Image: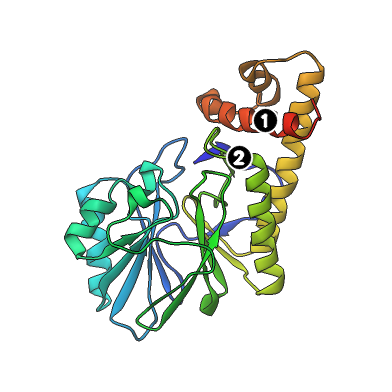
Amino acid sequence: MTDAAALPGQPRGGVLSGPATERTVNVLAPNPSAMTLDGTNTWIVAEPDSDLAVVVDPGPLDEGHLRRVIETAEESGRRVALTLLTHGHADHSEGAARFAELTGSAVRALDPALRLGDEGLGHGDVITVGGLELRVIPTPGHTADSLCFHLPADRAVLTGDTVLGRGTTVVAHPDGRLGDYLDSLRRLRSLTVDDGVHTVLPGHGPVLEDAQGAVEYYLAHRAHRLAQVETAVEDGHRTPAEVVAQVYADVDRALWPAAELSVRAQLDYLGEHGLI
């Protein structure tokens, strides 16, 4: 879910549908919009020689899409053994229950309300399926339940809505919190520095091949927006709607409701830190 069009300096990438890394294939959901970009990226993840696959974010409740995901896995000789959710927004998770019916797979998520099966997901968890290893990275901020999945073998990270392939993401106030989001971006930056992650496999938009550049861009963008919001308040713009009209004047008005969520999160952050 994005709050702005691509901005100058953002790292660029490619691949909207099909193979992305040695272990990942993207099946693009047919739900394009201003908020979902080209649609939701549903990721099939598997070891090259394995007959088992993990699916990350089955996407909306669209029968055709869910069946395409299964068919894509089966065409490569694989069975879907597990479904994972990066977070609970409907464009990522609404189809999960039906997908579980179709595949017989459990659904694991941070939020207990989204799970189908006994196991949830938490910090430090390592998921292993058919030789595949995915490490759970808590990344709250976009939502409280947001997770990323580190795929060490491909030096990649599946980011859901925490980092997008184009534009910037919404801090979905009040569930999302800006302080948490900034901490999550720093956590992802450490993955790029300490663990050599170079590829971002996002929940929307194209694959980014400069993970460190993408995270640095996001941190700089947030700092810039925060300074703009602080200035707008100093100029007498008190309500979130007034701040949006000032700070996001160059952004498509269709995105202003989403921008207002981020502004509310920014105002809370500035208030908590005694800056306004």
> In the orientation shown, which residue stands out farthest toward the bottom?
49
Label 2, label 1: how far apart the Cα atoms are = 8 Å
Residue 159 showing in the rendered view: no
The residue identified by callout 2 is: 177
Residue in the image at 48% along x and 62% along y: 122
Q: Nearer the viewer, residue 124 or 70?
A: 124
The kind of residue on which mark 2 rests is Arg
Above-or-below relation of 73 to 200: below
Res 108 → quadrant: bottom left
Q: Identify the secondary structure beneath mark 1.
A: helix
Q: Nearer the viewer, residue 28 or 160?
A: 160
Res 75 → quadrant: bottom left
Where residue 172 appears, x then y in whole percent?
53, 36
How many labels, in total? 2
Res 274 → quadrant: top right
Residue in the image at 30% along x and 63% along y: 118
Q: Of label 2 and label 1, which has the lower sequence position?
A: 2
Residue 61 showing in the rendered view: yes
The residue identified by callout 1 is: 268
Q: Identify the secondary structure beneath mark 2.
A: loop
The C terminus - image quarter: top right
Residue 86 vs residue 274: left or right? left
Residue 88 is tagged as none
Whether label 2 touches label 1, CB < 8 Å:
yes
Where residue 188 appears, x then y in whole percent?
64, 61
Above-or-below relation of 112 to 151: above
Where residue 23 appears, x then y in whole percent?
43, 75
Question: How many C-alpha atoms fall within 10 Å of the one at disc 2: few (<14), some, or many (≥20)?
Answer: many
> In the orientation shown, which residue stands out farthest toward the top?
236
The kind of residue on which mark 1 rests is Asp
Where residue 273 appears, x then y in whole percent?
78, 35
Residue in the image at 55% along x and 44% along y: 142
